[in-house]
Amino acid sequence: MKKVKVAFFAEILIEDFDGASRTMFQIIRRIDPEQFEFLFICGNGPDTILGFDCIQIPTLTLPFNKNYSMALPALAEAAIKQKLTDFDPDIIHIATPSLLGWFALRYARHNQLPVLSIYHTHFVSYLDYYLSKAPFLIDFAKTKMASSQKSFYNQCEKIYVPSESIAAEMVDMGIEQDRIKIWKRGIDTRLFSPEKRNVGAIRELTGYNDPVILFASRLVWEKNLETLIRIYDHCQNEKLSYNFVIAGDGTARSACEQRMKKAVFTGNLSHEKLSELYASADIFLFTSVSETYGNVVLEAMASGLPCVIADGGGSRDFITQGVNGYKCEPENEADYVEKIKSVLGNEALRQQFITEARDYSYGFDWNTLTDVYFHDLESMAQLTAI
């Protein structure tokens, strides 16, 4: 049987770099080399991935987020095209509508190849933060970005979107609904489990026996960290004896540490350490409204940790209000604090949230999701061959 050949374009192909990378590697680790052949083209990554070639092209570090870089395909155009000609792909997979993504899309359209894309990052929601010092530009920038995304995604045959909320926003942008397919994210419920609970370790971390409020995310301002800081201040002003633990790292960490002086900052943690924190804390607090999915919320739910999160972004779809967690007005710190107090003050409600959230998390299985992906690749390749 002829193998299906997939040219896979992504800015960064470093496992565990971020949520998008983790999702991509869940797929990559399940590639059957008897059925598929992949060529990876990226800005940052290894020379090979599971025996498949990985071509790295020049990059530019982003001035507003030095942890990320942007691939510059124009600086390696001839080499990329030659490699693609030699590889002769059946399908183009594009991770991001970046310069590299647009290069891949143009190549696909020129060669009449189908395109599959996974919507990893809700870039439109970031503009409120990146342009906060020039608010008069926000609406204009959002309109331009929405127009660009509409043009890009309406040229893709299939777009995997992780939540109904984000799918609705994309349709509102003008992206054609029949191109969109709900494709959620999986979770390892053996790794993220209440069995990882270690109260002694978390008490040693905080130095106190008070309830632990856990926040886990990249520490960048687009994660609505200003609201997180206001929640912390509100608790301090009310003299609520809560321990705030902030897991993660990023460009805003130093500023957060200066403004949340009694909080514990762990930096980046391994999945094993993070799973222990989830299972041992008392509340998971998440203020971000820029998530396409929000893996950390699902990880906390699987770990038996009651969630109080923003009613925004893709992660809000996980929570049925008052049944398996609470959703809050995204920038209303008092709302979050009232919901936290409600959970901590009502043991029956807390146990309900734990049970309902844990049961909900069992419905997310990576093997099932990646089977859908590979089946779609085969179907798209067959249509191309006709």
Image (spheres, grey):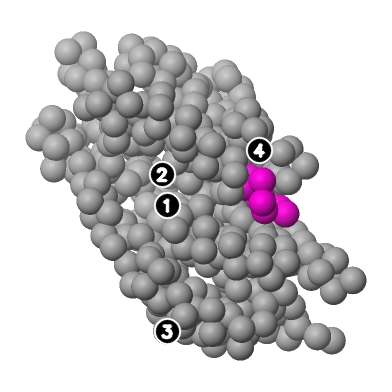
Pointer 4 and pointer 2: residues touching (CB < 8 Å)?
no
Nearest the camera: 356 or 295? 295
The image quarter containing residue 57 is: bottom left
Residue at label 2?
278
Give x and y (percent) for residue 228: 29, 27
Q: Looking at the figure, which quarter contains the N terminus?
A: bottom right
Q: Earlier in the sequence, mark 3 or mark 2?
A: 3
Foreground mark, 3 or 2, reads 3
Residue at label 1?
275
Residue that appears at 36% across and 73% down:
75
| Label number found at residue 175 | 4
Query: Cα distance, mark 1 to mark 2?
Result: 5 Å
Query: Cα distance, mark 4 to mark 2?
Result: 37 Å
Q: Is residue 287 left or right of residue 78?
A: left
Amino acid carrying label 2: it is: Tyr
Q: Earlier in the sequence, mark 1 or mark 4?
A: 4
Residue that appears at 66% across and 46% down:
154
| Label number found at residue 47 | 3
Give x and y (percent) for residue 244: 25, 33
Q: Few, some or many C-alpha atoms within 10 Å of disc 4 (few <14, some 14-19, many ≥20)? A: many
Q: Earlier in the sequence, mark 4 or mark 2?
A: 4
